[in-house]
Image (spheres, rainbow, N blue to C red):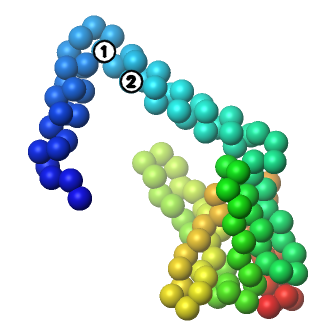
Amino acid sequence: MTSPGCWCWLCNGLAAIATKPLGWFPLGILCGGTGLSVSLLTLWPNSTWIKLGADGIRMRVLFRDFHHRWCDINVFGLTTMHTAYSKDRLVTFWVGPKNTPHSLPSGFGKKPNHLVELLERYWQRYR
């Protein structure tokens, strides 16, 4: 945990940048470049996918692999996430004895309702 005084150098630095002409331009380039890089990595072949099988859900998101067995999953559902500009629906499933929620990062080409039905069919068949 950082103390409130540790953020003063950041606030002072941003204030100094903002007072100069075109001061926010480098910061905008940095943030925009980061967002563009993450978007391109998501579109990169074999960087993001989901596979359903008898052993569970296998998923890769930005080259990180995840695996959840059907017997560990408690329930599937839809979570609505409200932002200032939109309302998104995410497929969420709860895992383990502590009921830890996990949300899928996208619909993987399916509408959330259809994806939940598909996942529940696999879950009921293989658990």
Position above or below: 84 against 55: above
Residue 11 at x, y percent in the picture: 19, 33
Mark 2 surroundings within 10 Å by alpha-carbon count, few (fewer than 14), some (14 through 19), many (20 or more): some
| Amino acid residing under circle 1 | Gly
The residue at the point 30 percent across, 15 percent down is 23
User: Where, quadrant-wise, is the N terminus in this rendering?
Assistant: bottom left
Q: What residue does disc 2 label?
A: 27
According to the image, label 1 marks what residue?
Answer: 23
67 over 4 or under it: above or below: below
Residue appearing at x 11%, y 45% in the figure: 5
Image position of 24 (left or right of 61): left
| Front-most of residues 110 and 60 | 60
Q: Disc 1 on helix, strand or loop?
A: loop
Is 127 left, or right, of 10 in this rendering?
right
The answer to whether residue 99 of the structure is visible from this angle is yes
Measured as percent of width and height from the top left, residue 81 is found at: 51, 61
* Percent position of residue 31, x then y: 46, 30
**Which residue is depicted at the point 53% across and 33% down?**
34
Residue that protrudes farthest toward the left in the picture: 5
